[in-house]
Image: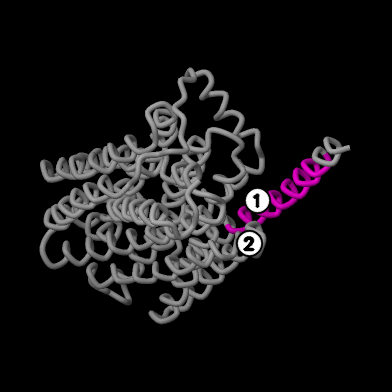
Amino acid sequence: MVSFGSPKYKRITLSLALGSFLVFSNLYLLQPMLPAFAIQFSVSETQVNWLFASTTLALSFCLVPMAVISESLGRRPVMMFGLLAIPVASGLMLLGQSFLFLVVCRAIIGVALAAFAAVAVAYMAEELDTKAFSMAIGTYIAANSLGGITGRISGGLIADHYSVATAIQVALVFTLAGALLVGYLLPKQQGFTPSSASFHHQHRAIISHFKNQRVWIAMLIGGINFSLFVNLYSVMGFRLVGAPHNVPVGLASLIFVCYLAGTFSSKCAGHWTRHFSPIQGMFLGSLLSMLGMWIALLEHLGAMMIGLLLISFGAFFTHTLAYGWVGRKAIHAKATATALYLVHYYIGGSLGGFLLLYCWQHGGWATVVFGGTALFIVMFFAISHLKRIDKHESSNDKGIFISKRT
C-alpha cells in the first residue's frame, strides 16, 4: 500500500485531483447560463433545468455499469477513456443550436463523466493505506469544488463577454490537455486484481451494498445533501438576475467563488476523521448548510453570500465524510459501492432541482427555504439512523471478535 507523503502518493493525489477538476468543471459549465438559456429558448426555470439534469441523470445511470466494467478491465483504463471522451462529446455541442440538441449532448457528456467519477475513489482505496486515503479523499473532493468553481465562473464570464460556443471551445481545449497530463502522471495500479466474475455476481454485489445499511444510509445522506447544495445555487442564480437585483449573468456567476468554502471544508473533513466521528461531522455539516439557507432569506447581497459560504462549507464537509465512509465500510466491490453512492448523489441533484426551482417559481426564496428545510429534516433523521445502526453493528463486531478469541 502507498503511504502518505511518498512520491507515488503525490503522483496519485495530483493526477486524480486534476481528473476530478476536469470532470466537475465540465459538469457545471452551463449552470450559470441557465437564466440566459431560459430566455433564449423561451422555456421556464423548471424546463431549462434539463440542461443540468440531463447530465447528472446520465452520469448517475452510467456510474454502476462503468464500475462493473472497471472490475474486469481495471480502474485506470476506464478513467482515461472517460477523460478523453469528454472533449469529444463537448465538440458535438458546437454542431447544433436547438434546446433539445443541447440537452442530448449534455447527456452524452454525463456518460463520459461517469467513467472517471465511478472508479477514482476505488482506485485510491485500493492503492493507499488508511492515513493516505483519508488525506487523499479530502484533496480529491477539494479539487471537485475547485473544478465546479472554475467551470461555472469561466463559463458565465466567457459566455457573457464572448459567446456560449467560445466557452465550450475553451473548456474543450483545456480538458484535452488536462486529460493527457493525467494519463502521464497516474501510476498503473498495483493493488487491483481483475475480476472475471459474471454479471450475476456483480448484481449480487450491488444487492449486498443495499443490504449493508451502514453503506446505503450514507448513500441516501449524500443524495439529499447534493439535492440541496447544487440546486440552492441554481435558484440563487435566478434570484440574482431577476428583480430587484438585476445582476448580469457573468457577474452573477461569481457567486460560485463561495465554493472555496467547500474546498477548505473538504480538507478539514480529512483531518476530522482522524480525531472525531464521521457521523457527527455529517450532522455538523448539514446543520451549517441549513443555517446558511436561512441566513440567505435576508434580501441583502452580503447576507446571500454569507449564506452560500455556509451552504458550501457544510455540504462539502458532509459529502467528503459520507463518500469516504462508503469507501471504507463497503466490504467488497468498492468501485461498485462508491459508484452507487454517486448514483444517489447525482439523482438527488437532478430531482432536487425540479423541487426547489418549482418552489422558486411559486413562492420565491421563502418557499425554497420551506422545501429545503423539509429535506434537511429528512437528512437529519437519516444521519441519526446511521448512528444507531453503526453503534449496533460495531457492538456486534466487537462481540464476534471476543467470541473468536475465547
- Please tell me whether residue 84 is drawn above or below residue 20 in the rendered image: above
Q: Secondary structure at mark 1?
A: helix
Residue at (28% x, 37% y) in the render: 81
Of helix, strand and loop, which mostly describes the magenta segment?
helix
Locate residue 158, reporting x and y percent: 16, 64
Vertical comparison of 221 with 318: above or below: above
| Number of on-image labels | 2
In magenta stretch: residue 393: yes
Tell which of 68 and 6 is nearer to you: 6
> Residue 127: percent from the left, percent from the top?
47, 44
What residue lies at 31% left-to-right and 73% top-to-bottom?
Answer: 243
Label 2: which residue?
Answer: 283
Task: From the top left corner, tell me how far across and down residue 306 is, in percent.
Answer: 45, 77
Q: Residue at left 59%, top 47%?
A: 218
Amino acid tagged 2 = Phe
Which percent across, then down, holds residue 124? 46, 47
378 displayed left or right of 111 = right
- Quick one: 48 or 66, which is closer to the camera? 66
Circle 1 crowding by C-alpha within 10 Å: few under 14, some 14–19, many from 20: some
The label shown at residue 382 is 1
